[in-house]
Amino acid sequence: MKSVVDKGIVYLVGAGPGRADLITVRGAEVLGAADCVICDRLANPALLKFARPDAEIIHVPKRIGSDSFTQEQINNLLLEKADAGKTVVRLKGGDPCIFGRCAEEVRALADAGIDFEIVPGVTAAIAAAEYAGIMLTDRDYSSQVVFVTGHEADAKQKSNIDWQWLAKFGGTIVFYMAMGNLDFITYELIEAGMAKETPAAVIADVSLPSQKTVRASLGRLSQKCEQGKIGPPAIVVIGAVAASDPRLNWFMKKPLFGKNIVVTRDTRGNADFAAKIISAGGNPIEFTTIKIRPLTESSRFLQTLAKIAEYDWVIFTSGSGVTIFFDVLESLGKDARVFSSAKIAAIGSETAAKLGKFAIKPDFVPTVFTGEELAKQLIGYTNLQGKKILLLRSQLASNELYQLLVTAGAQVDDVPVYTTVMVKNECSRLMGRIATGEVNWLTFTSPSTVNGFFEQVPADLINSGDVKVASIGPVTSEQLKNLGVRVDVQAAVHTVDGLLIAIEGMYE
C-alpha cells in the first residue's frame, strides 16, 4: 500500500521591528519547533538562535540581485515544504499582516488545504515611534492614527491613497517603505493642503544600536534626511506628535547607545554578554577566541566524582565549570545530592548565579572575585586545617588559589573539568573596522581570551588606534600588559556586569 505523507503546517510569524528579543513568546516557541524556516530580508538573523540546529533555513529576499524571489516563488516554496509534511515558519519582518503580503500567502495555503497559523508581531510603526520617544496617540495632540504604504504595488494603474483626505487627517500619519518616494509623498501632502510646517520625523534602523532619527518640518523633511544620509528601512511619522519632547527619546540616551563593542569569549559566553550589551544600547561584535572543551571523561574526574561526598568544601571558580559539571551529573542520572554534606564556594556572583540555576546557594562567596581573595577570605571565614577541599576549575587556571589553601593546612585536590582551546577567525574585516575607528571597545574576560585574540590580531593595531580596551579584572589585565597592550579600564567588580558598568562610566 502506498504511504501518504501528512501535510504539514505553516506558521506566519511576525519577527518584530529589528531587535531579536522583541519577537513574541509564541513566535519564539514555533521557531523552535520548525523543520524549515523561510526568512524575509528584514527579519533579524539573530532570531535563528531560536531555531533547531537541524532546521532548514531558506532566505527569500525580494528585489535584491540575482538571488531575489518573487511572491509566487515564495508561495510555491511554502506549499512544497508543507506538502512534504514539514512544520514551516514563514518569518516576516514586523507584523506579518501589516504591508507584509501575508494575505497572498495564506490564500495560497487555504486553496491548497494546508493548515496555517498567523503569529502577530510588533509592527515597525509602533516600535519606531516608541523607540524614538514619539507617542502615536496623545490625548493633547492626536486621538487617531493611520498606517499608509509608501510603496504601492508596481502593477497598479491608479493609487489607492487619498491625498486630499490624508492632508486633512486630524491625527498621526505613519508611512511604511517611504524612503524611495519621500519627495513625492511630502509634495502630494503639501499640494493637497497640509501645512509645510507640520512636524515630521523619520526613524531608521528601528530598535537597533544603529537607529537614527531625523525631525523636521514636512517641507524640509526630505532635505534633512538627505543631509543625514538616512536610508531604508525607515518609518515616517507625520503630525503634531512628531514634535514630542526630546527627553522622551529613552532608547538613544542609553549609556552605550551606538557603541560597537567586541566580545571575545566562547560562543555561549559571547551570546550572554551580547544580550547585556544590547540591553545597554550597544552593538555587540562577536569574535569568538576560545572554545570550552570538557575534561569530564577523564578517569581522574570520574574517580573524584564517585567520592565527592567525602570533601568538606567543593569550590567552583567559573560559570563554565558549573555548567559542565552539572551537564555530566544529568548525563549520569544524578543531581546535587552528590555533594552530600560538602559545603560549596563560588569565586563570584556570576558563578554563584550559575549554581543558583541548579537550586544551590553557595555557602561562601568572597567580596572580591579573584582566586587570591577567595583563598584569603575563605581562610578567614573558617579553619581549613586538615579539611578536604576539591577545586573544580579550568586546567589553565593559575596555581595561586591551590597554594594558598595548601599553606593553610587543607588537603586540596585540583581537578580540571575543562580547558580552553583557541578558535581561529577570519580577521581582516574586524581589523579593518578597528583601523578605521569604527570599533569603540575590545573586551576581555580571561587571560585565555587575551591570548586567543592577540594570536590573531597584532597588538600594534590596538595601541596605535582609537579603540579602547576593557578588562574584567587584575589577572586579565596583567596578561594584556604582558603582551604590551594598554588597558583603558578595569572592572571594579570582576564580572561581565561589572565590566559593562566600567565602560559606561567612561561616558559619564
Image (cartoon, grey):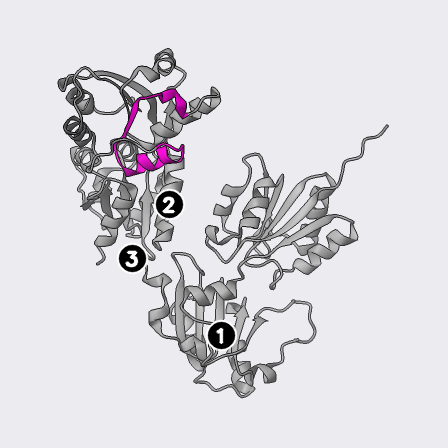
Q: Nearer the viewer, residue 162 or 136?
A: 136
Residue density around tag 2, few if under 14, some if 14–19, many if 20 or more, within 10 Å: many
Residue most toward the front?
A: 341
Q: Tell me the SS state at disc 1.
A: loop
Q: Is residue 229 visible?
A: no
Q: Tell me the SS state at disc 2.
A: helix
Residue density around tag 3, few if under 14, some if 14–19, many if 20 or more, within 10 Å: some
Q: Amino acid at mark 3?
A: Pro
* Magenta-drawn stretch contains 33: no
Q: CA distance from mark 1 to mark 2?
A: 33 Å
Q: Quadrant of the N terminus?
A: top right
Q: What span is in magenta?
A: 336-360
- Across and down, in percent, residue 217 comes to 42, 80
Residue position marked by numbered label 2 in the rendering: 274
Is residue 472 positioned above or below 399 on the image?
A: below
Residue position marked by numbered label 3 in the rendering: 255
Q: Quadrant of the C terminus?
A: bottom left
Q: Nearer the viewer, residue 433 or 38?
A: 38
**Image marks 3 and 1: residues in contact by CB distance under 8 Å:** no
Would you say 288 lies left or right of 94 here? left
